[in-house]
Image: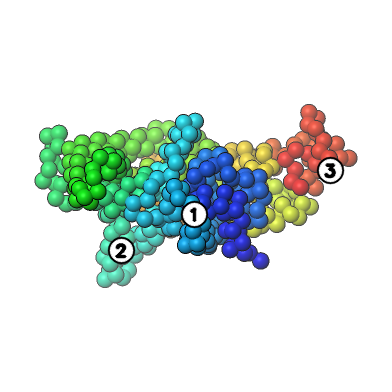
Amino acid sequence: MRNDSATASDVLALTGGPANITQVTHCLTRLRLTLADPAAVDEESLRALPGVLGVIGAGTPSLQVVLGPGVVDTVTAEVERQLAAAARAGGVQAGTGAVDAGGGSDATAPGPAPAPATRGGAVLRRVANVFVPLIPALIGCGVIAGINGLLVNAGWLPGLTPALAAIASGFMALIAVFVGYRTAKEFGGTPILGGAVAAVVVYPGVAKVTAFGVHLSPGQGGVLGALAAALLATRVEKWCRGRLPGALDVLLTPTVTVLVAGLATLYGLMYAAGAVATAIGTGANWLLTTTGAFAGLLLGGLFLPLVMLGLHQALIPIHTTLIEQQGYTVLLPLLAMAGAGQVGGALAVYVRLRHDTTLRTTIRSALPAGLLGVGEPLIYGVSLPLGRPFITACVGGSAGGAFVGFFAMLGEKVGATAIGPSGWALFPLLTGNQGPAPAIAIYAGGLLTAYATGFAATLAFGFPRGTTPRGRSPRGTAPRGETPSPAGRTPGDPA
């Protein structure tokens, strides 16, 4: 029986104890911990914990513990509860930073700076941390928008559809404020000041402001402008706090922060971020229109390694920018093919190693999540430990991505109105330049292509030569060029 309290206790013990944790967040599948001392983590024991599917970022201040959907919510809540209890009991040492139990205080100190060798990856993870907590709202509003679109197209419930449109659109209209709040919080500023500066981006009155000879438009620059504005506000705030005495700090720091960062946002950042956002939209459209099949092949094939490294969340700002501009992101359906390729590969493993009951049980438990687009259980429980099936799953993702990208070259774009789900869970969010029906049909074709290719590639190339359906080489000998293992297992054969 699952014991989330025990799992939380074990995770805390193996990551250096409560005093070593400076921040706690989570996404759909991963517990994300910011550590004061990365060397205090017992990675090997952490990976061996029951229920832990994988560990990412060991040796860096940003540690991710893969637990899977549903489990991560309850384990994170337990971690936060135990950290709060340790803090009340005096168990958190001074100088380690405030515990972020679901967000942290409005003036928490940032975690320790990452080492130069990992600075690039750490920055991407911190940017991802800004957007990850926004995903539930993006999913919920996206599903409601999809339902509303179906009702409008069918002419049903005309009295209800305006209300649904307001509910679905309200969050996206103000997403810049949430991004600003989260950015300041993640990078060590006062979150409410980050939100206040980012609110300038969406304030209707900016239409009266002229920058570079043209009037600004409310929302110009979108989430990128909000991200930049809040980052600048955080820098200004830190500069002020280090130079102003306490009596003046309370009054002048927020005033100077909002004024300086707000003026810079109006007279520079909004214009620059708007140009970048336009370039992203134009580039994505050009990429799919001219090289759709090839682009889909690359994106579908390379996404699983990004998920494995925990860097896929860094694409959220790009998805969000496309949704703001076009109403949907054309990249997510292509990337979703990676998970479908892995499902096909896992099915091939299930068929080939039919006498390996432990592995088959793992596959049966992980497949439902995989079909709904949650790939970590299959990555860390099946394909990555076996080695070759991970590569052949990427081949399946490439095939599915090429299928969807090919139709984009023909003028049939497939997009998602929100980010978060993939696999079958993406169907309610699908639309495109020709409407939802063609988009759903093309996406379904891509899934089937990825399933079939991942299955066939894994069956043909996913196992060492000479492996029998039991997962053993004949007479306990390894295939040519490979060293026999003590139990007669070939490399990549599960225990």
Going by the image, does 209 lie left or right of 181?
A: left
Foreground residue, 89 or 301?
89
Q: CA distance from mark 3 to mark 2?
A: 60 Å
Amino acid residing under circle 1: Val
Label 1 SS: loop
Q: Quadrant of residue 262?
A: top left
Q: Position of residue 25 (x, y in %)?
A: 46, 53
Q: Earlier in the sequence, mark 1 or mark 2?
A: 1
Going by the image, does 337 lie left or right of 492?
A: left
Q: Residue at x 61, y 61 (%)?
A: 6
Q: CA distance from mark 3 to mark 1?
A: 46 Å
Q: Give neighbour class at mark 1: few <14, some 14-19, many 20+ (Cα, 10 Å).
A: many
Q: Earlier in the sequence, mark 3 or mark 1?
A: 1
Q: Which residue is under mark 2?
A: 167
Going by the image, does 89 lie left or right of 326?
A: right
Q: Position of residue 401 (x, y in %)?
A: 50, 41
User: Is residue 87 in view from this perspective?
Assistant: yes
Of marks 3 and 2, the one in the foreground? 3
Q: Position of residue 492 (x, y in %)?
A: 72, 40
Q: Which mark is residue 263?
A: none
Label 3 SS: loop
Q: Position of residue 29 (x, y in %)?
A: 52, 53
Of marks 3 and 1, the one in the foreground? 1
Of marks 1 and 2, the one in the foreground? 1
Quadrant of the snapshot with the N terminus: bottom right
User: Is residue 325 in view from this perspective?
Assistant: no
Q: Which residue is under mark 3?
A: 487
Foreground residue, 40 or 202?
40
Q: Which mark is residue 92?
A: 1
Q: Earlier in the sequence, mark 3 or mark 2?
A: 2
Q: Residue at x 52, y 45 (%)?
A: 63
